[in-house]
């Protein structure tokens, strides 16, 4: 049997950290993001991830890949209770979350998900001119008149008793929309999580603080800066990465984990999937440098579809 020499220290380690949701469930701090992953790619990605030690997979009805993800979960043969699976309610299903959840579970081939999130605070007309993003003649989004995300959330709350989701939460909620939701008389369950775009170019400290103050776990999507990836070329992040002898992606993922944020890097590349589960301990100074990066590079939001007339991103703070 061979042993590592006593002086050999691992600079990075597979992240096994979990964060407690208000429901008491433990959510693994690093999960696999699957947006824009095709069926074939996502099947392999989920299988690779589960074999590498991931226990948290994040998908959505709108990604169109729930079936392939379910197939990969079954192929990996990890006991269901070890897994944390999230899927999301699409906008045209806001008035019928039960049916939408049932449809997602049928595709995933699962009896329950661990977390069901409202994908956007925008109820769209289920009978509009497009099945996913219906528009009005003026080109604006065809929102459901007389229905708000508060009504959607009230219906989502009733899902908990049925046991087909263990927790409910939201995505892309700003402080003002969260406040509106929490203030509503019909809201009896604080959202377990708010999944938002979060990285050093968009650190959103006020939103993160608000969530922390209300026991809402923050989940970071596009932690690497999504498709264009200017963050991966950032000189400050590269310097920190070089100091630790790790990839830039590892620094970005580690930064999120160090803030007690759940982080969902998306990849379909086996080697990246594996390294994205590794984290390093950043010094307080490095974490502060990353938090201040947007002051030099400019605040940048990479995922900002036009939802008008609905207001979604009223602040970058
Ligand atoms: P790919 O899926 O081809 O591996 P985000 O999670 O911020 O949305 O970023 C996703 C993008 O980042 C995808 O294009 C993905 O490419 C790429 N990516 C994921 N992990 C890494 C990594 N460790 N190094 C470089 N690029 C990565």
Image (cartoon, rainbow, N blue to C red):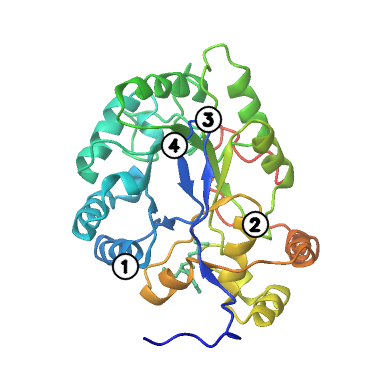
Mark 2 or 3, nearer chain start: 3
Numbered circle sitting on residue 258: 2
**Where 269 falls versus 35 (above or below)?**
below
As displayed, is residue 52 above or below residue 113?
A: below
Q: Nearer the viewer, residue 263 or 222?
A: 263
Mark 1 or 3, nearer chain start: 1
For label 4, being within 8 Å of ligand 1 is answered: no
Q: Is residue 21 above or below residue 160?
A: below
In the picture, the disc for residue 48 is 1
Q: Quadrant of residue 163?
A: top left
Tell whether 182 sits left or right of 282: left
Cα separation between marks 1 and 3? 31 Å
- The quadrant in which residue 43 appears is bottom left
Viewer-proximal residue among 305 and 7: 7
- Tags 1 and 3 touching, CB below 8 Å: no
Secondary element at tag 1: helix
Q: Visible in this render: residue 161?
A: yes
């Amino acid at each position: 049997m061979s042993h590592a020499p006593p002086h050999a220290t691992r600079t990075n380690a597979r992240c096994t950290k979990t964060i407690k949701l208000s429901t008491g469930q433990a959510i693994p701090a690093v999960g696999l993001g699957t947006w824009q992953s095709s069926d074939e790619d996502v099947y392999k990605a989920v299988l690779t991830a589960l074999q590498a030690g991931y226990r948290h997979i994040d998908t959505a009805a709108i990604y169109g890949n729930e079936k392939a993800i379910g197939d990969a979960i079954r192929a990996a043969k990890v006991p269901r209770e070890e897994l944390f699976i999230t899927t999301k309610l699409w906008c045209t299903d806001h008035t019928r979350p039960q049916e939408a959840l049932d449809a997602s579970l049928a595709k995933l081939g699962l009896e329950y998900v661990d977390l069901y999130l409202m994908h956007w605070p925008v109820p769209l007309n289920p009978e509009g001119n497009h099945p996913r993003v219906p528009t009005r003649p003026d080109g604006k989004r065809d929102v459901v008149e007389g229905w708000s995300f508060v009504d959607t959330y009230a219906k989502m709350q009733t899902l908990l008793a049925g046991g087909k989701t263990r927790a409910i939460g939201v995505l892309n909620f700003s402080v003002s929309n969260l406040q509106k939701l929490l203030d509503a008389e019909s809201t009896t369950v604080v959202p377990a999580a708010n999944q938002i775009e979060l990285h050093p170019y968009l650190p959103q400290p006020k939103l993160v603080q608000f969530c922390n103050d209300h026991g809402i776990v923050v989940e970071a999507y596009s932690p690497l800066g999504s498709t264009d990836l200017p963050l991966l070329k950032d000189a400050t992040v590269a310097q920190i990465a070089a100091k630790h002898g790790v990839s830039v992606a590892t620094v970005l993922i580690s930064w999120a984990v160090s803030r007690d944020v759940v982080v969902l890097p998306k990849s379909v590349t086996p080697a990246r999937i594996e390294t994205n589960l590794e984290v390093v301990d950043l010094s307080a100074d490095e974490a502060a440098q990353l938090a201040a990066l947007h002051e030099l590079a400019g605040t940048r939001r990479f995922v900002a579809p036009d939802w008008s007339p609905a207001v979604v991103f009223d602040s970058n703070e």
